[in-house]
Image: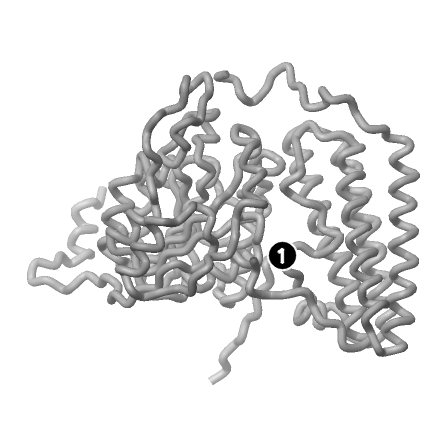
């Protein structure tokens, strides 16, 4: 539906670094926003989880910035790394948030983001003709695959909640 | 002359106040679209005024770093029109919801379209009064059956875009909050367009209308290109399914400017009357 901006085209190594950086930064911003929402709605367990996720994505972003060396990856990212529908691959879906959501739900959002990032970098590996881009994109694919596994491991600690997880003894629909 | 060029990031338009909307609310995306549009246009935050009325949507001025006026229920357009005609140098954006804008402020809506002051009116439409816990609004479907509207209202919903066109709005568009980049593009176009620009944003209320989560699948790009022909626009809007997204009308009316009259009052003389 969006006419612009479309998914960024990666033409060289600098573009890939910029896109990879922006993906992490977008994820940081989104997790921070979700943490703020949970803070407002007094769900402290989720505040911690979203802040931890934001911190982890921020570390990845910094790693990419270091990999870029003297190249100004931040400026390049601002120029070109804009995603269709305003949703960068690792950005958790704001519309899926709920004030009573559980760690399992937060990890589902995270898992979806990691899987989208994995698919995105995989498509670059499959489509690029530039060997340097292919090499770095392959490393990013490995990294994202590790993150997917990590979220799966964390999910063992937080099993799916029962169907009544959203039951609220004092619901917002007070007039019904 | 040394002219300072300032580049703005989205973050420059965000305040430190944390939104208290429900998690999942579409208005978070609308706020994001506001700041994206402002950054896209490179407008200095101190030259923008966000005016609002009452309701969930109307909390938005507090969440921006621009000037703001959280006004009286349904009266945001009157406030904004007064501001814009006295300070035409400012960019005036008005935020409202379907209750504030189409019911309590319905009369102002008609006359703001008719008057065509150069400002942008954004209505976050969720087809419900969210802040007061789920009463039907003017855009609620007639069969929406709840304890507050047993058996549904059975009242034909208000068609804001048709009303805007008939009343003289100079730019009419519909967006979906779940596509913040596209919404930002349209808001930027609306702000740039001279005269009264009306942008309806479908913004789901996840608490009182969880069914609106399906809007994501229902919205679609308008199958026709924008028009400046009122007749064509009217036919399109009358047959509209409510989910066409895009710029639907871009008019050519000259924006309203108050003419200098022979009875104009010297403001400094007026000020003296209020001196204590």
- Way the structure is coloured: one colour
Which residue is farthest left? Answer: B262
Q: Tell me if B191 is positioned left or right of B107 in this view.
A: right
Up the image or down, B27 lies above or below A44; here it is below
Q: Which residue is drawn at 75% across and 59% down?
A: A23
Mark 1 neighbour class, 10 Å CA radius: few under 14, some 14 to 19, many 20 or more: many
Which residue is farthest top? Answer: A169
Residue linked to disc 1: A86
Q: Position of residue B19 (x, y in %)?
A: 57, 40
Q: Where is residue A71 in the image (x, y as percent from the top left)?
A: 80, 76
Up the image or down, B52 lies above or below B154; here it is below
Q: For the residue labelled by badge 1, is the local secondary structure a helix, a strand or a loop? A: helix
Q: Which of B116 and B156 is in front in this view?
A: B156
Chain of the residue on which disc 1 is drawn: A
Q: Tell me if A86 is positioned left or right of B165 in this view.
A: right
Q: Residue at x 79, y 56 (%)?
A: A117
Q: Which residue is drawn at 77% across and 49% down?
A: A113
Up the image or down, B40 lies above or below A100; here it is below
Q: Where is residue A125 in the image (x, y as percent from the top left)?
A: 85, 67
Work out which quarter of the rendered image holds the C terminus of chain B and state it. Answer: top left
Can residue B69 be seen from the camera position used here? no
Q: Residue at x 83, y 56 (%)?
A: A118
Q: In which quarter of the image is residue B103?
A: top left
Q: Position of residue A59 (x, y in %)?
A: 84, 55
Count of residue discs: 1
Q: In which quarter of the image is residue B261?
A: bottom left
Q: Tell me if B68 is positioned left or right of A13 in this view.
A: left
Can residue A146 be seen from the camera position used here? yes
């Amino acid at each position: 539906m969006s006419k612009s901006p479309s998914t960024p085209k990666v033409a060289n190594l600098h573009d890939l670094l910029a896109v990879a950086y922006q993906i992490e930064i977008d994820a940081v911003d989104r997790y921070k926003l979700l943490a703020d929402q949970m803070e407002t709605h007094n769900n402290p367990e989720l505040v911690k989880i979203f802040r931890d996720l934001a911190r982890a994505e921020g570390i990845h972003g910094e790693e990419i910035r270091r990999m870029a060396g003297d190249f100004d990856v931040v400026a390049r990212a601002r120029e070109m790394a804009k995603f269709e529908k305003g949703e960068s691959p690792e950005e958790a879906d704001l519309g899926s948030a709920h004030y009573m959501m559980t760690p399992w739900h937060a990890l589902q959002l995270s898992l979806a983001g990691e899987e989208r990032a994995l698919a995105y970098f995989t498509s670059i590996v499959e489509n690029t003709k530039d060997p340097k881009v292919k090499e770095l994109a392959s490393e990013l694919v490995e990294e994202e695959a590790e993150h997917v596994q990590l979220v799966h491991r964390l999910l063992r600690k937080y099993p799916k909640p029962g169907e009544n997880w959203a039951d609220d003894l004092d619901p917002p629909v007070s007039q019904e | 002359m040394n002219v300072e060029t300032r580049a703005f990031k989205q973050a420059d338009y965000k305040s430190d106040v944390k939104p208290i909307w429900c998690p999942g609310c579409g208005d978070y995306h609308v706020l994001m679209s506001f700041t994206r549009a402002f950054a896209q246009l490179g407008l200095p935050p101190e030259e923008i005024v966000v005016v609002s009325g009452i309701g969930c949507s109307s909390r938005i001025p507090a969440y921006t770093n621009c000037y703001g006026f959280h006004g009286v229920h349904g009266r945001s357009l009157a406030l904004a029109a007064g501001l814009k005609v006295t300070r035409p140098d400012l960019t005036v954006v008005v935020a409202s919801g379907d209750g504030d804008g189409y019911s309590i402020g319905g009369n102002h809506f008609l006359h703001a379209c008719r008057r065509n002051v150069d400002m942008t009116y954004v209505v976050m439409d969720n087809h419900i009064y969210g802040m007061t816990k789920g009463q039907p609004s003017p855009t609620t479907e007639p069969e929406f059956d709840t304890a507050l509207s047993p058996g549904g209202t059975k009242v034909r919903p208000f068609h804001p875009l048709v009303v805007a066109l008939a009343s003289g709005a100079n730019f009419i568009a519909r967006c979906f909050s779940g596509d913040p980049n596209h919404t930002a593009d349209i808001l930027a176009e609306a702000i740039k367009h001279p005269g009264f620009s009306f942008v309806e944003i479908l913004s789901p209320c996840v608490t009182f209308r969880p069914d609106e989560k399906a809007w994501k699948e229902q919205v679609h790009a308008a199958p026709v290109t924008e028009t400046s022909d009122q007749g064509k626009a009217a036919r399109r809007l009358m047959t509209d399914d409510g989910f066409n997204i895009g710029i639907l009308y871009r008019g050519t009316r000259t924006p309203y400017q108050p003419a200098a009259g022979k009875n104009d009052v010297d403001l400094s003389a007026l000020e003296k009357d209020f001196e204590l």
